[in-house]
Image (tube, grey):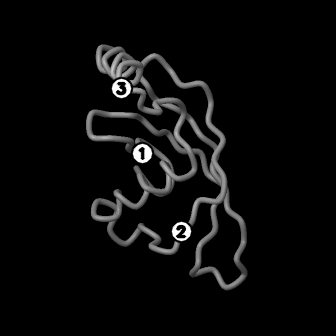
């Protein structure tokens, strides 16, 4: 709770964009998970769209994402729900897209 308050204050003071995560933010957070994800990480995964809710008091957002994989010969569109949180180290995925 304190972290969320501090981050909100920091956003207001510095002018940083601290609203719901965007498609680009979720893509970057996914790519940062590569070392921890091992074989589950798809280097060709591309987030196409992300729609996030309002967020909770701890600064976590639930987002519905649609994505494609360059490894899929049919280029099918896939969907997942991810949980993203703004931390002192930037945005991280706390669940979804193969994170357990």
Identify the residue under disc 3.
Answer: 14
Q: Secondary structure at mark 1?
A: strand
Spatial CA distance of label 3 from label 2 is 32 Å
Q: Secondary structure at mark 2?
A: strand
Q: Is 39 placed above or below 31 here?
A: below
Identified at 27% across, 33% down, the residue is 88
Q: Is 45 placed above or below 60 here?
A: below
Question: How far across and how far down the image is residue 20, in percent?
Answer: 54, 33
Question: How far across and how far down the image is residue 37, in percent?
Answer: 34, 62
Identified at 34% across, 64% down, the residue is 34
Disc on res. 84 = none
Q: Is residue 49 left or right of residue 96?
A: right
Tag nearer the camera, 3 or 1: 3
Question: Crowding at label 2, few (<14), some or many (≥20) Cα neighbours within 10 Å?
Answer: some
Depth check: 18 or 13 in front? 13
Label 3 or label 1, whichever comes before in sequence order: 3
| Whether label 3 touches label 1, CB < 8 Å | no
Disc on res. 93 = 1
Residue 38 is drawn in which quadrant? bottom left
Disc on res. 45 = 2
Identified at 32% across, 34% down, the residue is 87
| Whether label 3 touches label 2, CB < 8 Å | no
Depth check: 68 or 11 in front? 11
Question: Crowding at label 1, few (<14), some or many (≥20) Cα neighbours within 10 Å?
Answer: many
Spatial CA distance of label 3 from label 1 is 24 Å
Question: How far across and how far down the image is residue 15, in percent?
Answer: 42, 27
Total marks shown come to 3
Spatial CA distance of label 1 from label 2 is 15 Å
């Amino acid at each position: 709770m304190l972290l969320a308050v501090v981050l909100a204050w920091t956003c207001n003071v510095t002018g940083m964009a601290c609203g719901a995560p965007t498609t680009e933010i979720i893509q970057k957070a996914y790519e940062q998970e590569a070392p921890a994800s091992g074989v589950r990480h798809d280097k060709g995964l591309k987030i196409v769209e992300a729609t996030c809710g309002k967020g909770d008091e701890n600064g976590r957002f639930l987002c519905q994402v649609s994505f494609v994989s360059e490894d899929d010969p049919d280029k099918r569109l896939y969907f997942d729900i991810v949980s993203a949180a703004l931390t002192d180290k930037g945005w991280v995925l706390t669940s979804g897209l193969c994170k357990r």
